[in-house]
Image (cartoon, rainbow, N blue to C red):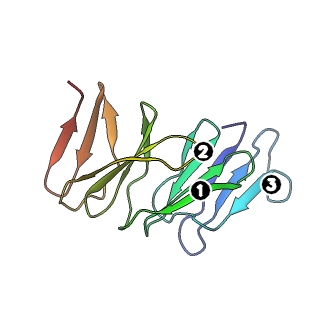
């Protein structure tokens, strides 16, 4: 991602940190940290880098898109629901899964564009998986495979 390594610190004080790893050794806090963001930093879901955008979703359902090189916010949107699953990128789309079982599909890009909402109506904590051209979704009681015909 533009020569950066993106790290989420997780619990207590969630922060997203962009690190320039080239030539880094030892404590690089003062020398190799490009930027830090606390607003919109998730506890559980991992960040997602697509092209020059870094996508975040908080545990409380706020999605954010940052410019990866600078940490500048491009957009922020309250999705509703709680999130544990990490976002997934496939075929130009970003897939998000709420704990309540609602799948949200966004168009990847610097502007917020929601393409679909798909309710599973079952608790879902796991992240999506992609294999053999199909999207796999594991809920509390089921495993679903979704694929274009």
Q: Position of residue 98 (x, y in %)?
A: 33, 59
Q: Is residue 93 left or right of residue 76?
A: left
Relative to 63, is 68 above or below?
Answer: above
Q: Residue furthest left?
A: 141
Q: Which element carries disc 1, helix, strand or loop?
A: strand
Above or below 19: residue 90: above
Q: Mark 1 highlights which residue?
A: 75
Residue 39 screen position, x and y as percent? 62, 68
Density class for disc 3 (Cα within 10 Å; few <14, some 14-19, many ≥20) is few
Q: Sequence order check: which comes first, mark 1 or mark 2?
A: 1
Give how far across and how far down residue 55 sits, in percent. Answer: 55, 50
Residue underneath mark 2: 110
**Quadrant of res 21:** top right
Mark identifier at residue 28: 3
Instruction: Kindly report which numbered mark, 2 or 3, lies closer to the viewer in this rendering.
Output: 2
Q: Earlier in the sequence, mark 1 or mark 3?
A: 3
Residue 101 location in percent, x, y?
25, 58
Crowd tier of the residue under label 2, counting other residues whose Cα lies within 10 Å: few below 14, some 14–19, many 20 or above? some
Q: CA distance from mark 2 to mark 3?
A: 30 Å
Residue 124 position by quadrant? bottom left
| Viewer-closest of 26 and 105 | 105
Q: CA distance from mark 1 to mark 3?
A: 29 Å
Q: In this view of the protein, which residue sits in the foreground, 148 or 57?
A: 148
State yes or no: discs 2 and 3 in contact (Cβ < 8 Å).
no
Report the residue that reaches farthest toward the bottom: 12
């Amino acid at each position: 991602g533009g020569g950066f390594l993106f790290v989420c610190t997780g619990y207590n004080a969630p922060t997203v940190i962009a690190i320039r790893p080239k030539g880094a050794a030892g404590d690089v806090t003062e020398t190799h940290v490009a930027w830090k963001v606390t607003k919109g930093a998730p506890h559980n879901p991992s960040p997602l880098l697509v092209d020059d955008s870094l996508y975040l979703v908080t545990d409380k359902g706020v999605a954010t898109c940052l410019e990866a090189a600078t940490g500048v916010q491009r957009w922020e949107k309250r999705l509703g629901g709680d999130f544990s699953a990490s976002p997934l990128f496939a075929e130009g789309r970003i897939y998000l899964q709420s704990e309540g079982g609602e799948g949200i599909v966004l168009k990847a890009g610097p502007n917020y564009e929601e393409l679909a909402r798909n309710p599973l109506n079952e608790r879902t904590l796991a992240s999506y998986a992609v294999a053999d051209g199909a999207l796999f979704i594991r809920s509390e009681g089921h495993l679903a495979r979704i694929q274009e015909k």
